[in-house]
Image (cartoon, rainbow, N blue to C red):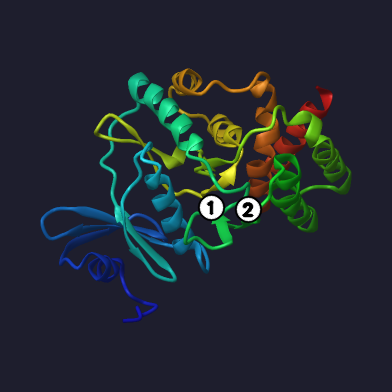
Amino acid sequence: MRPRDDEGPGATAARFTGRPVTGERTLSATLAEVTLDGGQVVMVKRGDGPGAAQAEAAGLRWLADAGEVPVPAVHGHDGHRLVTDRVPQGRPDSRAALRLGRDLAALHAAGAPAFGAPPPGGPRDAYIGSAPMRNVDGTDWPAWYAEHRVLPYLRLAVDEGTVRPAEAAVIERVCERLPELAGPAEPPARLHGDLWNGNVLWGADGRAWLIDPAAHGGHRETDLAMLHLFGCPHLDEVLDGYQQAAPLADGWADRIGLHQLFPLLVHAVLFGRGYAEQALGQAQAALAH
């Protein structure tokens, strides 16, 4: 049965779980919390565009298949909506952060078929937040990262006037020099892909859960750079746990800015000039090394 465009969150939750609904609460224009008969609570999310719900569902399942980092179970999705379990929340602490680092290392080690590979069942045309993100396979990380993660958003930002042409030239020089700046070659990692602090939920079970992925095959340092970008509670412990499980290549800290160019340019496209200035600063710092 095809859902109506005006179907409410409760009806969507009932359709995918097969259970009666006893309550619902709107959290935002795109997110609602629905209580099912028996007390279980699920989240109903409206996707940001065509294929967004499919991409997020496939990403959650791909992360779950690794068996390393807890993610909410997917009850179902259609063209516009996604229904998942709600994560009961607790508080961040150093023990959970240390475990998150180890779990992330194991998740990344689960691997991907190629850089840019989408999750099984996920569309090539996916999203990072509300911005389109195209997943195109590549075998060489520096070339793939420049062509499919940095330059598309740089062009959009220039077209919108958010990045000036002279500034774009600086970022383009970084792309040209990526083979020498990127550090040792790494195999494709299974990335969350949008790992900012808001997508890490500190669960009541004492573990850190991941939500809202933009999952794809990528470089493992990219997820860690995203955690640095907007801050994360107990980040030092997260990194300690990661390094204990899978030490990062020498010089990784100097490459954080390279990996932040992608999310900063996405944010410049979505939110404006301040993020463009941050991207330019990171590009200039990379060229100074």
Q: Residue at x 70, y 36 (%)?
A: 278
Q: Residue at x 54, y 20 (%)?
A: 247
Q: Earlier in the sequence, mark 2 or mark 1?
A: 1
Counting from the top left corner in percent of width and height, residue 71 is at: 35, 44
Closer to us: 253 or 171: 253
Quarter of the image for residue 10 reads bottom left
Decide if residue 78 is on the left or right side of residue 55: left
Secondary-structure class at tag 1: loop
Pointer 2: what residue? 270
Pointer 1: what residue? 129
Q: Which of pointers 2 and 1 indicates the residue nearer the eye?
A: 1
* Mark 2: amino acid: Leu
In this rendering, the answer to whether 207 lies above or below 125 is above
Q: Are marks 2 and 1 in contact (CB under 8 Å)?
A: yes
Closer to us: 270 or 178: 178
Counting from the top left corner in percent of width and height, residue 250 is at: 66, 18
